[in-house]
Image (cartoon, helix red, strand yellow):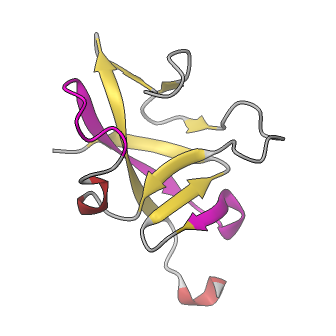
Amino acid sequence: VKELLNFPLRFYKYVRKEDGRYISFYDYDFKYVLGEEIVPKNTGSVSSGIYCSKTKEDLVGSTYHSEDEKVIIELEIDSLDDIKVFKGHSGIVLNKCKVIGECS
């Protein structure tokens, strides 16, 4: 499978933008910093992970789609090991990723 994928892979997520910072809707203390690798808290928990989508279009109708202060950020992974689980046809849960930037 690894040979079929063209790394790095990119994924997308809604976050809250506040005073130029990108903050998780789920956990206000969790920040997404541009250019940095992030790892979720409680990595031993079954539900832990960075929930995101394969495309920006897949975010439409998702959990935080109706939030007024939302922005989309782009995330990047370099390895299959960075993927925790696939959820449905478009959802992905990541073990870690790099924050690339805000999307338009």
Above-or-below relation of 17 to 36? above
99 left or right of 50 in image: left
Residue 101 location, quadrant: top left
The image quadrant where one finds the C terminus is top left
| Front position in the image: 34 or 74 | 74
| Front position in the image: 3 or 43 | 43
Image coordinates of residue 97 in percent, x first then y, are 57, 48
Q: In the current view of this chain or complex, which residue is farthest to the left?
A: 104
Residue 78 location, quadrant: bottom right
The image quadrant where one finds the N terminus is bottom right
- Does residue 65 show up magenta in the picture? yes
- Does residue 8 show up magenta in the picture? no
Number of numbered callouts drawn: 0
Q: Which residues are magenta?
A: 63-86
Above-or-below relation of 69 to 38? above
Image coordinates of residue 102 in percent, x first then y, are 28, 39
Image coordinates of residue 3 in percent, x first then y, are 62, 88
Image coordinates of residue 26 in percent, x first then y, are 50, 28
Q: In the current view of this chain or complex, which residue is farthest to the top?
A: 19
Residue sitting at 33 percent across and 38 percent down? 64
47 left or right of 7 in image: right
Residue sitting at 65 percent across and 63 percent down? 85
95 left or right of 70 in image: right
| Front position in the image: 2 or 68 | 68
Residue sitting at 52 percent across and 71 percent down? 7
